[in-house]
Image: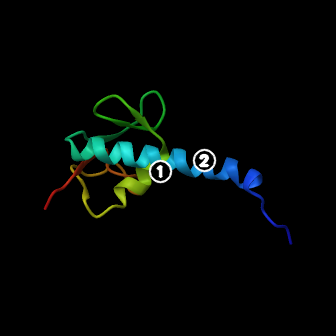
Amino acid sequence: MTIHTPASLRPKNRRVDRRLAEINDAGAAMRAGAALHFTYQPTPHWVLSTGVPVTDETARLIIATPNVVSVDVALFDGVPSQTYRWSFS
C-alpha cells in the first residue's frame, strides 16, 4: 500500500486538467455553432468545423452527451456518424 504525495499526484492532475480543458473548449465551440466531424483523410480523426483537432477520447465523451446529436448516418455499421451538432432543445 502506498501513500500518494502531492508531488506524485501532480502529473496525473495535469493530465486530467488538460483533458477537461479540451472537453470544455470543444463543447463551448459546439454551443457557439461549430460541428464535430469524423473524417478518414488521411487517417481516421475528429476535427471541429473551426479546424481544431479533437482527440478520439474527447470526441467520444462529447458525443455521449445528451445535447449532442448526430446530423447524418454512419457509412458503415459499428462506426460513428460523421457529423455531430449541439442541440438546444
Q: Position of residue 41 (x, y in %)?
A: 42, 29
Q: Is residue 3 above or below residue 88?
A: below
Residue at coordinates 24% horizontally, 39% vertically from top-left? 34
Q: Position of residue 8 (x, y in %)?
A: 76, 53
Q: Position of residue 73 (x, y in %)?
A: 25, 52
Q: Amino acid at mark 1?
A: Leu
Judging by the rendered image, the residue that carries numbered circle 2 is: 15
Coloration of the structure image:
rainbow
Helix, strand or loop status at disc 1 = helix
Residue 58 appears left or right of 6: left
Residue at coordinates 22% horizontally, 49% vertically from top-left? 72
Helix, strand or loop status at disc 2 = helix
C-alpha separation, residue under disc 2 versus residue under disc 1: 9 Å
Residue 4, which numbered label? none
Query: Which quadrant of the figure contains the N terminus?
Result: bottom right
Count of picture labels: 2
Closer to us: 82 or 31: 31
Residue 9 appears left or right of 60: right
Quadrant position of residue 63:
bottom left
Residue at coordinates 62% horizontally, 52% vertically from top-left? 13
Q: Amino acid at mark 2?
A: Arg
Mark 1 surroundings within 10 Å by alpha-carbon count, few (fewer than 14), some (14 through 19), many (20 or more): few
As drawn, the residue found furthest toward the left would be 89
Residue at coordinates 38% horizontally, 31% vertically from top-left? 52
Q: Earlier in the sequence, mark 2 or mark 1?
A: 2
Mark 2 surroundings within 10 Å by alpha-carbon count, few (fewer than 14), some (14 through 19), many (20 or more): few
Residues marked 2 and 1 touching at CB (< 8 Å)? no
Residue 20, which numbered label? 1
Residue 44 appears left or right of 7: left
